[in-house]
Image (cartoon, rainbow, N blue to C red):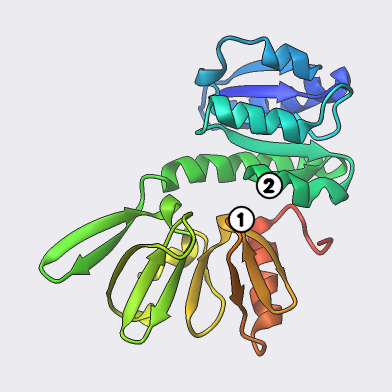
Amino acid sequence: MYILICDDEPAVARQVEQLARQHLEQRGIPVQCAVCTRGEEVLARTDLAKYQLALLDVDLETMTGIALGRWLKQQNPELVLVYISAYLEFAPEGYTVRAFRYLLKRDMERMLPSCLDAVLAEHSRECRTLPIRQGRRETEVPLDQIYYLESDLRKINVYGETLHKPLCSYYGKLTDLPASLQEDGFLRVGRSFVVNMRYIRQISNYKVMLQNGVELGVSRNGYAAIRGAYLEWKGQFGDEL
């Protein structure tokens, strides 16, 4: 795995590299790391296309990690962004660039290994699909393209990033969806919606807010359990959000 690390504290950057290398190599995964202490060092690199994971500090000395991550995503859309910071308050901003996770520095030794496992699982997950039968035709929709599924009378509408435009619609019920979807990070948030948790920006005030701006109502009776399931899935936040 090719990993890009940027933190303006050299000691922290080295610690991140050591933890990542040790954890992945224990799993038999070769690791190549590029360690930078300034955003400008990252901008000057000519080999960014090969990197699969970027571990970035949010509060860099000469630029924000958010701006750096946005630029990196433009150069390499498949790059997985993970932010590491001393301050939880930056977390919502991190998800504006579709960050995969946000880790607190004080929890890094404990949480980085599980985050890396989640990144590996995500790579495996991206090839998984939802099988759909439309009449006599069978299709498969990649799970990473699905933001949420909506029950609409006897149909299920499958929505992606584009607002109000389903990827597809087919006859079926949410209760007939594969049980494996839950293991793949999908959460039922009410009678009519099943949401891909990787695209949740926030759950509050009985609403789920997705990264593409969609807001969905959450069952009031199940709100606490739904929000708890999401926070547990996110893992690194614990009870702090």
Left or right: residue 115 versus residue 108 is left
In the image, residue 28 lies at what x, y percent? 51, 27
Q: Residue at x 64, y 65 (%)?
A: 209
Q: Secondary structure at mark 2?
A: helix
Q: Residue at x 84, y 61 (%)?
A: 240
Q: Quadrant of residue 113?
A: top right
In the image, residue 39 lies at what x, y percent? 77, 19
Left or right: residue 73 versus residue 85 is left
In the image, residue 81 lies at what x, y percent? 64, 36
**Quarter the C terminus occupies:** bottom right
The amino acid type of the residue labelled 2 equals Thr
Q: Is 216 located above or below residue 47 in the figure?
A: below
User: Is residue 94 among what the camera can see?
Assistant: yes
User: Is residue 114 among what the camera can see?
Assistant: no
Q: Secondary structure at mark 1?
A: loop
Please state which of residues 163 and 187 is positioned toward the viewer in this rendering. Answer: 163
In the image, residue 23 lies at what x, y percent? 64, 32
The amino acid type of the residue labelled 1 equals Gln
Please state which of residues 167 and 114 is positioned toward the viewer in this rendering. Answer: 167
Q: Residue at x 58, y 9 (%)?
A: 46
Lower position in the chain sequence, tag 2 or tag 1: 2
Rounded to the nearest angstrom, the CA distance separating label 2 from label 1 is 7 Å
- Residue designated by label 1: 211
Rate crowding at label 2 as few (under 14), some (14 to 19) or many (20 or more) other CA atoms within 10 Å. few
Labelled disc at residue 96 = 2
Please state which of residues 69 and 18 is positioned toward the viewer in this rendering. Answer: 69
